Amino acid sequence: PRRPRVPGRQPPPSESRFGRRLRRLLLYMVMWGALFSAVVGGVYAFWAAQLDMSDVQQIRERSTVFDRDAKPYGRLQGENRLVVPLNQVSTFFVKALLAREDSRFYKHSGVDPIGILRAVVRNFVSRSSAQGASTLTQQLARNSFPLGGKNLHRKILEAFVAVRIEKYFSKDEILEHYMNRI
């Protein structure tokens, strides 16, 4: 049944066959793109979930040899590194580090979309890839786990691991682990 025509009102313009096909094609592309993104995201999330977050805390140090009175006698071969708690680090150093490496450290959850957008724009304008977009947490993830070479795969995995690190540790713990490792 047809609707009765209201006087003074124009009927809606009929959409062309091409317009309907184009709209349907765009809808399919959006649906398949969303499905593809969900599957890829699920694979990377699963992969990141397999990593042991306690490895972030494990930093190789030199072995210390103690005498029988429990006083340090010497150190054996290895990395010359001592773990320093965050409360023993100068606040000036911490502020300088955050200003240089990740000024929005306390505002994001491991991945900084604003920083990524800034880096993409600057790299596009300069036609290079000199501007990095990694947050401090992503750098900690990259240096704590063997995530692969310098490619898109590693960057995506690094982002998922960074989000896990942010859920597992407090911001101050992340900062402490970063300073001791890097």
Image (cartoon, grey):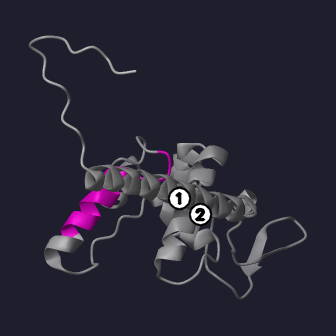
Q: Could you say which is closer to the camera, residue 5 or residue 122?
A: 5
Judged left or right of residue 179, residue 93 is left
Task: Indicate which disc residue 125 carries.
Answer: none
Q: Position of residue 176 (x, y in %)?
A: 55, 54
Q: Which residue is situated farthest in the top direction here?
A: 7
Return the residue nearer the eye: 12 or 91.
12
Figure quadrant of residue 14:
top left
Q: Position of residue 180 (x, y in %)?
A: 56, 64
Query: Is residue 114 on the magenta stretch?
Result: yes
Majority secondary structure of the magenta segment? helix
Looking at the picture, tell me which residue is in the foreground, 8 or 169.
8
Secondary structure category for the residue under label 1: helix
Q: Which residues are magenta?
A: 109-122
Farthest-out residue, bottom? 77
Mark 1 touching mark 2, by CB under 8 A? yes
The crowd level at tag 2 (other Cα within 10 Å; few <14, some 14-19, many 20+) is few
Distance of mark 1 from mark 2, alpha carbons? Answer: 5 Å
Q: Is residue 154 visible?
A: yes
Residue 136 position by quadrant: bottom left
**Image quadrant containing the N terminus:** top left
Q: Could you say where residue 160 lies in the image, as x and y percent from the top left?
A: 58, 58
Residue 167 x/y as whole percent: 63, 45
Residue type marked 2: Val
Q: Which residue is mark 1?
A: 37
In which quadrant of the rendered view does residue 5 lie?
A: top left
